[in-house]
Amino acid sequence: MLGEIVFAVGSRPTLSAHDAELLAQFLELGRDGRDAPMVELAVKIRDHNRSGEEITLDRDELTALARLFNEAPDLLTAPEFAAFRRLKDEVAAALEI
């Protein structure tokens, strides 16, 4: 398993490979698998987890992440998910541009 996943947004937040897999799972569960951008982003995260390349997010993927963080605030407050807070801030800033 790779050490970390880098998101090519803002200051390039990183997640450990484990946290990236958790995020992919939350994206799949976030809309019961019916939201295409969330499901596609989960696949993209897993692919990049294997390849080690940076993840570049398009507007739909940024919006999907922002929606997940808004709909699941526990992902931002629970200590075990602390790594998600920086990613959430970078995603929000990117969407404001």
Image (tube, grey):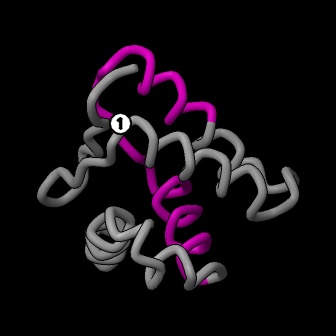
Foreground residue among 57 and 49 = 49
**Is 49 situated above or below 39?**
above
Q: Position of residue 42 (x, y in %)?
A: 61, 41
Residue at the front extreme of this rendering = 80
Q: For this view, does 78 lie left or right of residue 3?
A: right
Classify the position of the N terminus by image quarter.
top left
Quarter where residue 24 is shown: top right
Examine the structure image and report whether residue 44 is included in the region drawn in magenta: yes
User: How many other residues sit within 10 Å of disc 1, few (<14), some (14-19) or many (≥20)?
Assistant: some
Please state, as top left, top right, bottom left or bottom right, where the C terminus lies in the image: bottom left
User: Residue 71's x, y, as percent?
Assistant: 66, 81
Q: Main secondary structure of the magenta part?
A: helix
The amino acid sitting under disc 1 is: Ile
Which residue sits at x=44%, y=48%? 19
Q: Is residue 5 magenta?
A: no
Residue 25 coordinates in the image, percent (x, y): 67, 48
The span picked out in magenta is 43-70
User: Residue 46: x and y, percent?
Assistant: 54, 29
Residue that lies at the very extreme toward the left in this rendered image: 11
The residue at which mark 1 appears reads as 55
Provide the secondary structure element on which disc 1 rests: loop
The structure residue drawn at horizontal position 40% and vertical position 46%, both measured from the top left corner, is 57
Seen at 32% across and 48% down, the residue is 15
